[in-house]
Image (cartoon, grey):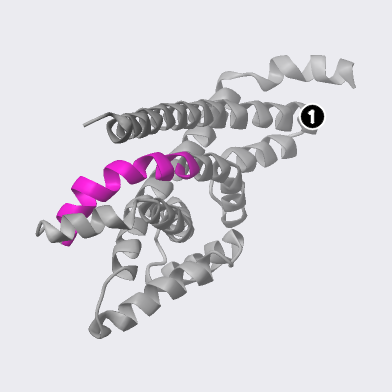
Amino acid sequence: MLAELANQIPRFFTYYTVLLLLQAMWTTLAMTLAGCSLGFVLGFGVVWLRDTRGALFLPVRVAAVLYIEVFRRIPFLVILYLVLFFIQAIDPDASLFTIALVGICMLSVAYTAEIIRTGIESVAHQQIEAAAAMNFSRWQCMRMVVLPQAWPVILPPAFSFMVGFIKDTALVSQIGVLELTSAGKILNNRGFSATLVFGTILILYFALSYPLSRLGAYLEARFASARNQRSELRLGLTLSPP
């Protein structure tokens, strides 16, 4: 086995093989970043609709809750096939990358909406009431009062979701998108050892996910430190003599 690997390595790491792997690596990263980022933005919109008030907006709230609950319980591969059949029925020439991106975004919206809702609900309700008493609009209250305090709660799990989803993008190979797992299958079918091929794929997945996970850990530690400093400041002001 070792002799076979030593024989294949010079033929494996050629210009065109490395180019194929880099292209697949870029596709994996681009799908993850674009799909999760767009899903995060739309997830905020879903949370905004879910928190609307009044009987007139009841159908909107119900639709937002149903979307979150349903899509969090559907396997990603099923979502991909549904999006594939729906989009190709409308536009047969749609690119597979676009189809995969739509599927990623639909799933990302459902999960990030719950992350955002949890972060918003971590803010003390008294502060929201105080902002309302000062005639802040709903958007002003969200932008100036809620979100600055909710970011430390929102960003760490959001990064964890995105890093975890890098691995789940392997499923888009089932609809023909050329990403890392798909590139590994192609190279394996060309006669290269599975150990060599998927060992390389493993390293490339790690190279993609590790920097993002470290960035998430850095942001979590920084936000936690900032929160602790604010808490200590509030405690000091409370305990200080008049």
Mark 1 — residue? 195
**In terms of depth relative to the viewer, which is nearer, 54 or 22?**
54
**In terms of depth relative to the viewer, which is nearer, 19 or 86?**
86
- Residue 102 relative to residue 5: left or right: left
Residue 15 screen position, x and y as percent: 56, 19
Furthest residue in direction left, as rendered: 135
Residue 172 screen position, x and y as percent: 57, 52
Residue 20 visible within the image = no
Q: Which residues are magenta?
A: 138-158
Residue 111 screen position, x and y as percent: 48, 57
Q: Is residue 153 magenta?
A: yes
Query: Main SS of the magenta segment?
Result: helix
Task: Residue at 64%, 19% (x, y): give it.
Answer: 13
Q: Is residue 221 magenta?
A: no
Residue 109 screen position, x and y as percent: 42, 58
From this view, report whether residue 169 is shown above or below residue 69: above
Q: How many marks?
A: 1
Task: Residue at 17%, 55% (x, y): give it.
Answer: 131
**In terms of depth relative to the viewer, which is nearer, 176 or 69?**
69
- Residue 157 relative to residue 130: left or right: right
Task: Residue at 31%, 77% (x, y): give it.
Answer: 60
Helix, strand or loop at mark 1: helix
Q: Which quadrant of the figure contains the N terminus?
A: top right
**In terms of depth relative to the viewer, which is nearer, 32 or 238?**
238
